[in-house]
Image (cartoon, grey):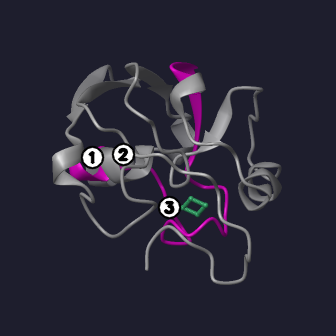
Amino acid sequence: MGGRNPYFDELASVTTATRKFKVRFLPMNLIVEVDPDKLPFGDTGLPGSILDAALANGIEIDHACGGVCACSTCHCVIQKGGATLSEMSDGEEDQLYNAPGLTPDSRLSCQAVADGSADLVVFIPDWNRNATRENH
Ligand code: FES
């Protein structure tokens, strides 16, 4: 099952969106619409997570562990709308600590699920963007 690390007992508190919202991905400046009626988009990351929405729209954020909160390669920085995201679990916090370029607004995109009450702006660090796949 994508999104959950089987070695963690605790589960993050997640409220999925009930209305459509938009995510602007930077620096490529691509805007995607997230329609909660179509969740999950795939099987990588929590359903409705930033990673789930990105991959469904051809935006390749690295996700070495497959979206189960066991690495930090899906690190992103939430520039707007961070208050609408699910609470960070202890497991996410532990993994995020290993991410290069950490900021106070950093999240693991496979674990951050928006409640849809506002649009998001998400910056993907260049070392986490899979440019090879984006070009295909
Ligand atoms: S893909 Fe590994 S923690 Fe998100």
Q: Which residues are the magenta region? A: 55-82
Q: Residue at 44% of width from left, 73% of height from top?
A: 2
Residue 47 percent location from the top left of the image: 37, 58
Q: Residue at 55% of width from left, 53% of height from top?
A: 111
Secondary structure mainly formed by the magenta segment = loop
Check disc 2 and report the residue beneath it: 131
Bin the neighbour count of mark 2 within 10 Å (Cα to Cα): few under 14, some 14-19, many 20 and up. Answer: some
Q: Is residue 135 visible?
A: no
Check disc 3 and report the residue beneath it: 63
Q: Report whether the residue tagged 3 is closer than 8 Å to ligand 1.
A: yes
Q: Is residue 132 visible?
A: yes
Bin the neighbour count of mark 3 within 10 Å (Cα to Cα): few under 14, some 14-19, many 20 and up. Answer: many
Check disc 1 and report the residue beneath it: 134
Q: Residue at 63% of width from left, 65% of height from top?
A: 69
Q: In the image, is residue 24 above or below residue 92?
A: above
Q: Nearer the viewer, mark 1 or mark 3?
A: 3
Q: Specify whether residue 65 is painted magenta.
A: yes
- Work out whether mark 1 precedes mark 3 in sequence or the reverse, and give the earlier one: 3
Q: In the image, is residue 90 above or below residue 36?
A: below
Q: Specify whether residue 109 is painted magenta.
A: no
Please state if 32 lies on the left or on the right of 124 as rendered.
left
- Work out whether mark 3 precedes mark 2 in sequence or the reverse, and give the earlier one: 3
Residue 7 percent location from the top left of the image: 72, 83
Badge 2 vs badge 1, beta-carbon distance below 8 Å: yes
- Which amino acid, by three-letter code, is at mark 1? Glu
Measure the alpha-carbon separation of dots 2 and 1: 5 Å
